[in-house]
Image (cartoon, grey):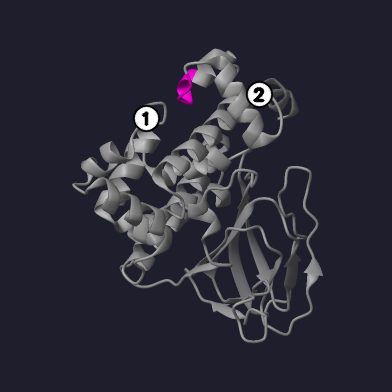
């Protein structure tokens, strides 16, 4: 199991949704904060992203970002933002539907108005156990369209747009699968772009052969009683050298990360599967159901059975 797929699976809580819409200038929407993640794709025309406040910016605000045809933007943290035909266009609040979607009123502008075709969507994610691979993302990820660049991401966008434009038998199953595919391609594209310029954090961790090998091993078999020496040996490093490198890049010592991931895995199993507690304990690396329950309560503040009922 690769780390990126695992990180998404651990946070997913419901069906993603999307819409394909045509807007005629002037238009502007203000999207409220949400628990999930959102994306926008400009299929035709142009738009402006009015990003959330950025504490790293000199004035604490995010500068408007022009989006051209084929541009994709991901807002992974569910922060409120705006989208409009121009940066100074007044924004209308978008109220989320019960399923978390963002319905917008139909737009039938004048014939000579500037037209923009948008593909927008959102993912329902739990942030209670957010993986640091996602929490480390910037306020927004902008992937400009470039000829010949990111062909798999472009193919996913085109297939999703086609299914939404002309639904066919099976679209109800195809669209959610394409949305999950699109999210993974977005994150992979960002990671591949960032790793060339970043030797720290999770971009550095997934690019470092020794650390990446150890992470894949931990995710593939979290129940195994791993030792730091064994993990270091997988990447050809001594125990001390591996521990230093892993802690620097991942932000936790190897066994601390393993414990965190075991508890995250346990929470997901309790939330999504009707497995006996002894099975959840075993899959989480605990031979004793009592030891598992004690560790789980220390991590989540409640017993595993209570967590399952509350989820």
Q: Is residue 168 visible?
A: no
User: Where residue 119 is drawn, which disc sits there?
Assistant: none
| Image point (39%, 60%), residue name | 203
- Residue 221: image tag: 1
Q: Is residue 41 left or right of residue 197?
A: right
Q: Magenta segment range?
A: 282-286
Decide: is 241 above or below 171: below
- Count residues near mark 2 (Cα–Cα under 10 Å), then give few for <14, some for 14-19, many for 20+: many
Horizontally, residue 277 falls left or right of residue 223, namely: right
Residue for badge 2: 304
Q: What is the x, y in percent for residue 292?
A: 56, 23
Q: Residue at x 27, y 36 (%)?
A: 230
Q: Main secondary structure of the magenta part?
A: loop
The correct choice, above or below, for 256 with respect to 187 in the image is above
Residue furthest front as drawn: 240
| Quadrant housing residue 172 | top right
Residue 52's x, y, as percent? 67, 71
- Does residue 92 lie above or below 266 as drawn? below
Element type at mark 2: helix
What element does badge 1 sit on? loop
């Amino acid at each position: 199991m690769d780390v990126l797929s695992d990180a998404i699976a651990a946070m997913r809580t419901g069906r993603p949704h999307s819409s394909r819409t045509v807007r005629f200038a002037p238009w502007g929407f203000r999207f409220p904060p949400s628990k999930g993640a959102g994306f926008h794709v400009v299929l035709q025309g142009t738009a402006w992203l009015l990003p959330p406040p950025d504490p790293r910016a000199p004035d604490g605000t995010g500068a408007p970002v022009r989006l051209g045809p084929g541009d994709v933007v991901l807002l992974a943290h569910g922060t409120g933002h705006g989208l409009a035909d121009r940066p100074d266009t007044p924004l209308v609040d978008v109220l989320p539907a019960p399923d978390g979607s963002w319905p917008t009123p139909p737009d039938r502008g004048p014939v000579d108005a500037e037209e923009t075709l948008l593909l927008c969507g959102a993912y329902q994610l739990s942030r209670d156990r957010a993986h640091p691979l996602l929490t480390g993302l910037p306020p927004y990820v902008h992937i400009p369209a470039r000829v010949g660049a990111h062909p798999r991401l472009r193919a996913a966008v085109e297939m999703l747009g086609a299914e939404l434009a002309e639904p066919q038998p099976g679209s109800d199953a195809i669209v959610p699968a394409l949305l999950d595919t699109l999210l993974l391609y977005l994150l992979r594209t960002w990671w591949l772009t960032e790793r060339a310029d970043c030797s720290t954090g999770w971009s550095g961790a997934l690019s470092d052969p020794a650390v990446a090998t150890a992470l894949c091993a931990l995710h593939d078999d979290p129940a195994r009683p791993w030792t730091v020496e064994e993990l270091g040996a997988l990447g050809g490093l001594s125990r001390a050298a591996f521990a230093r490198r892993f802690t620097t890049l991942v932000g936790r010592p190897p066994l601390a990360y393993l414990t965190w991931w075991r508890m995250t895995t346990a929470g997901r199993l309790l939330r999504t599967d009707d497995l006996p507690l002894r099975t959840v304990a075993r899959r989480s690396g605990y031979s004793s159901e009592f030891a598992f329950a004690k560790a789980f309560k220390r991590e989540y503040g409640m017993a595993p059975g209570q967590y399952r009922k509350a989820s």
